[in-house]
Amino acid sequence: MSKYIFVTGGVVSSLGKGIAAASIGKLLEARGLKTAIIKCDPYLNVDPGTMNPYQHGEVYVTDDGAETDLDLGHYERFTNAHLSRDSSITAGRVYFSVITKERHGDYLGKTVQIIPHITDEIKERIMKVSKSNDVDVTIVEIGGTVGDIESLPFLEAIRQLRWELGEHYALNIHVTLLPYIKSAGEQKTKPTQHSVGRLREIGIIPQILMCRTERPISQEQREKIALFCNVDVEAVIEAPDVKHIYECPVVFKKEGLDELILKKLNIKLPDRGIKSWEEGVVKRLRSPAKEVTIAVVGKYISLQDAYKSIYEALVHGGIANNARVNILKIDSEDVEKSGIKKYLKDAHGVLIPGGFGSRGIEGKIAAVKYVRENNIPFFGICLGMQIATIEFARNVALLKGANSTEFDAETPNPVISLIEEQKRVKDMGASMRLGAYSCVLTKATCSFEAYKNDKISERHRHRYEFNNTFRAQLMAKGLLIAGLNPERDLVEIVEIKDHPWFVGCQFHPEFKSKPDVAHPLFKGFITAALNFGK
């Protein structure tokens, strides 16, 4: 039977529970355990798919087409855990299921209540992941902070599970904050004490505290926290600010976190260390041999989390090339106002990420035109691929007014448009082309050279597609169709002849990139950018 680790957070949001959960998974896998990781989100949306990126950050997509919280991206980047739509449990999904069952008469006339019906649904979904993946340890992150009203059903569910499973089968880890008050010159433990107190009020007793801190925790402070929070001194784990998130497993390893977890779960395994992660990832991040600057031209630039997986995948491409990647963030609306040239004077490559809506589109098109004409390495992802197609159609194939029907429904040359099945869609949630689709690559292209394989599978999240009506016309002018979905004859990758590296892909390769196994296209893009910088 799987054992469980429940990760909660207190004091403030954005403490890094997702990174903590992912790091724990990494450390346990290094000890030889098979893990599953689940994110429980208390919001009433069924999933984050319809949320504005400014509200929730990026939407992460799994192979089976689930639109999920960005923390699942951390889980996949750090671990080998298999993630699916079952790995994301939202309050909206839970309530929708319970209400549907009530309408079907499944509760046999009973009064449907938060306890036991909602909490039972949560527990059932958590247990399902463990059983279906046959794992040794299941890590469950509870979104939000202790004290949030909407989180209470999830906290009650894990409280019940902890006691149902027994002492050595479930473990509560609480991520909390130790603020440093500069004017007083002191690190304060009271917020942590209050946070743990709130947990204990609802029946959850944390066995391990992961304390976020700007400064080292003294032995005296550890002992004080242990005394007031009723945990062992060794269970007060320092979680300091780090320059790179991939240093976290190394930091926690030095704190003895993995050994402590195994002890409390009554698991005995040899310590294999994480040397390959330290040498292959952390060391290269700290002391790279080379340096390169990549410009990201997007419309959600002001929010770091909107392109989280993109930024991480660029870092991975840098690690694979033993290079530091400096990311230059450019708002495409600023490009519309003042042109692109001044922004790219220090860039060795340009990436245009995905997005929706017409805002800032002409700025992106201007950026593609500049990099195409100046032979600067270019990488377009999802909307970025569509923008590259529009720019080529307008300025090389000379198709007047070429556009996407997303931005101009009356365009005379709709080189990007909805396919027939999308025209019938009424509901917005989970109705795009989502999840993994196969792609066959054309040989003698940058894409084939990157993958070293002619058959691949990548994840999608979009409604609009390359319009095949214009395929022959654009190809005659030099557009390369480097990848096709064989089942539906949909264009997946476009390139341009006689350009050092110009790749636009309809899918999202960033979702399958890891720090120790960079995605082939990101690795190839950074290689091309390094060559451009010579």
Image: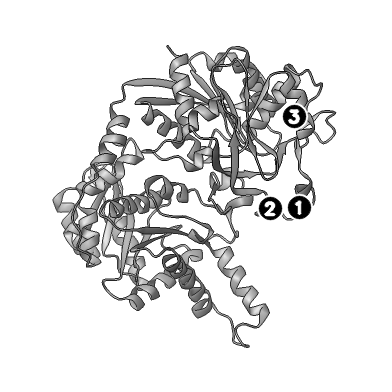
Q: How crowded is the residue under tag 2: few (<14 C-alpha within 10 Å), some, or many (20+)?
A: some
Between residue 455 and residue 357, name the one nearer to us: 455
Q: Position of residue 356 (x, y in %)?
A: 66, 39
Check disc 3 and give the amino acid type: Arg
Badge 3 element:
helix
Label 3: which residue?
471
2 and 3 marks in contact (CB < 8 Å): no
Query: Residue 292 lies in what quarter of the image?
Result: top left
Label 2: which residue?
431
Q: Position of residue 271 (x, y in %)?
A: 19, 52
Badge 1 element:
loop
Check disc 1 and give the amino acid type: Val
> In the image, is 64 to the left or to the right of 35?
right
Cα gap from disc 2 to disc 1, whole angstroms: 7 Å
Q: Is residue 230 visible?
A: no
Q: Mark 1 or mark 3, which is nearer the start of the sequence?
A: 1
Q: Is residue 303 visible?
A: yes
From this view, report whether residue 17 is shown above or below residue 303. below
> Can you tell which mark lies on residue 425?
1
Cα gap from disc 2 to disc 3, whole angstroms: 26 Å
From this view, report whether residue 74 is shown above or below residue 361. below
Q: How crowded is the residue under tag 3: few (<14 C-alpha within 10 Å), some, or many (20+)?
A: some
Between residue 271 and residue 159, name the one nearer to us: 271
Quadrant in which the C terminus is drawn: top left
Q: Residue at x 58, y 56 (%)?
A: 47
2 and 1 marks in contact (CB < 8 Å): yes
